[in-house]
Amino acid sequence: MTLEWLLIKCDCGNHYGIKKNSRTSCSRCGGKNEFIISQTFSSSKELHSAVSAANAPDEIIQIINSKLKKIEKRRKKNNFENGNITNLQILMKNATNKIGVLTLDNLKLVLKNNSVENIGAEELIQISESEGYIIRSGTNQWTWL
Ligand SMILES: [Zn+2]
């Protein structure tokens, strides 16, 4: 008896492979929708490459979409436009010690004490570095420019 392997196309557009007569839910949406059997294969290896090929364009679109979402999310978080960065800079100044050194640990503490939850210390430092406010002066420490 030869096993048959099926390439299934789910309603959601995802392709995935199953053994014939086995019951599986969609690997992407988890649904047990009405499946379209696109192709059958005699080996799991063939099936595997067919699944990859069938999903490739979708995957690329998904990766791009999720990257765009992340950028958009980050943009919203930073809120450079409405001046929130100024408040964050004040907190960063508070986290700076007497000799003008801003440390990651201090900044974490200050953010925590001020209930800043929408941005992490690492992220804030990264942004400030790229905006040219601060420059790394050692391990987990920065000085102001
Ligand atoms: Zn699905």
Image: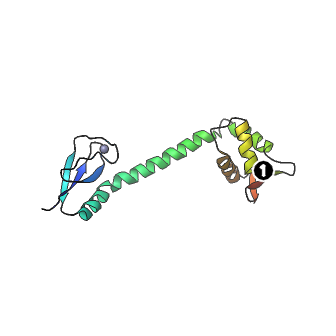
Q: Dividing the image into four equal quarters, which quarter contains ligand 1?
A: top left
Which residue shows up at 25% across the image and 40% down it?
A: 33
- Residue plotted at (74% across, 59% down): 139
| Quarter that holds the N terminus | bottom left
Q: Dividing the picture into quarters, in which one does residue 87 lie?
A: top right
Q: Position of residue 6 (x, y in %)?
A: 21, 54
Give the total of numbered labels. Answer: 1
Q: Is residue 45 above or below residue 114?
A: below
Query: Would residue 40 appear left or right of 117 to someone viewing this image?
Result: left
Mark 1 surroundings within 10 Å by alpha-carbon count, few (fewer than 14), some (14 through 19), many (20 or more): many
Relative placement, left or right, of 10 versus 119 is left
Q: Which residue is mark 1?
A: 102
Residue 88 point in image, percent of width and height: 72, 40
Q: Quadrant of residue 31?
A: top left
Q: Is residue 18 toward the left or the right of residue 60 in the image?
A: left
Q: Secondary structure at mark 1?
A: strand
State the residue lying farthest toward the left: 1
Q: Amino acid at mark 1?
A: Leu
In the image, the residue with mark 1 has its CB under 8 Å from the nearest atom of ligand 1: no
For image coordinates 28% across by 60% down, the residue present is 48
| Location of residue 3 by image quarter | bottom left
